[in-house]
Amino acid sequence: MIDDKEIVQKLNNRDEQALTDAETQYGALCKSVARNILGSDADAEECLNDGLLAVWNTIPPEQPRSFCAYLLRIVRNAALDRFKARQRGKRGSGQTEAALEELSELLPAADDVERQVEQQELLAAITRFLQTLPQKQRQLFVRRYWRFASYAELARDYGMREGNVQVTLTRLRKKLREYLREEGLL
């Protein structure tokens, strides 16, 4: 198994093997995230390919601390861009739209510089909030609102009932809202 530093080093050296290594190491995870957003294996594959091309074009000069997180963010953003270009809910069984709607009251619109700064502060606060949660709750939150996993998928993977997953996530959103109020971000 090749590690992130080796992949980044190969990219710095312009060794195309880095892309094969990245796909072998992280392709399934990236496609899973894109598939959860778009509901299509073919679209997920295209997002992975777009992500690999973007990595090739950005490293160097970029030197990510975590290559996996860097690639995953690029693929996720590519999938979200594709999703936004379509009619909402038409594909992907509505999971992306539902997850975004659940968080909508906590997220500012990104239509100007001030809002973008607010968004960066908000993301930092959400990261701090997640660090306060027990591992299982943190994983549920991230898988639902970052990877757009369905309630059914989360219930299956964590041995819970769908209703319990929904209740847990509702409580976590309430805790997050309180946390953001204490931080002066709401």
Image: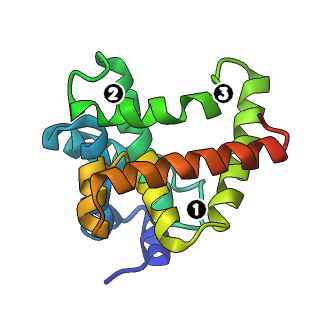
State the mark number for residue 24: none
Mark 3, Cα crowd under 10 Å, few <14 / some 14-19 / many 20+, is some
Q: What element carries label 2?
A: helix
Residue located 79% across and 38% down the image:
185
Q: Quadrant of the C terminus?
A: top right
Q: What residue type is labelled 2?
A: Phe
Q: x and y percent of residue 65 in the render?
A: 60, 67
Residue 24's place in the image compared with 40, above or below, is: below
Closer to the chain start, of discs 1 and 3, is 1
Q: In which quarter of the image is the N terminus?
A: bottom left
- Judging by the rendered image, the residue that carries numbered circle 1 is 64
Closer to the chain start, of discs 3 and 2, is 2
- Residue 106 located left or right of residue 182: left
- Judging by the rendered image, the residue that carries numbered circle 3 is 108
Residue located 33% across and 28% down the image:
82
Q: What residue type is labelled 1?
A: Pro
Q: Can residue 83 be seen in this view?
A: yes
Observer-nearest residue: 132 or 87? Answer: 132
Observer-nearest residue: 157 or 43? Answer: 157
Closer to the chain start, of discs 2 and 1, is 1
- Judging by the rendered image, the residue that carries numbered circle 2 is 83
- Residue 1 located left or right of residue 122: left
Residue 144's place in the image compared with 11, above or below, is: above
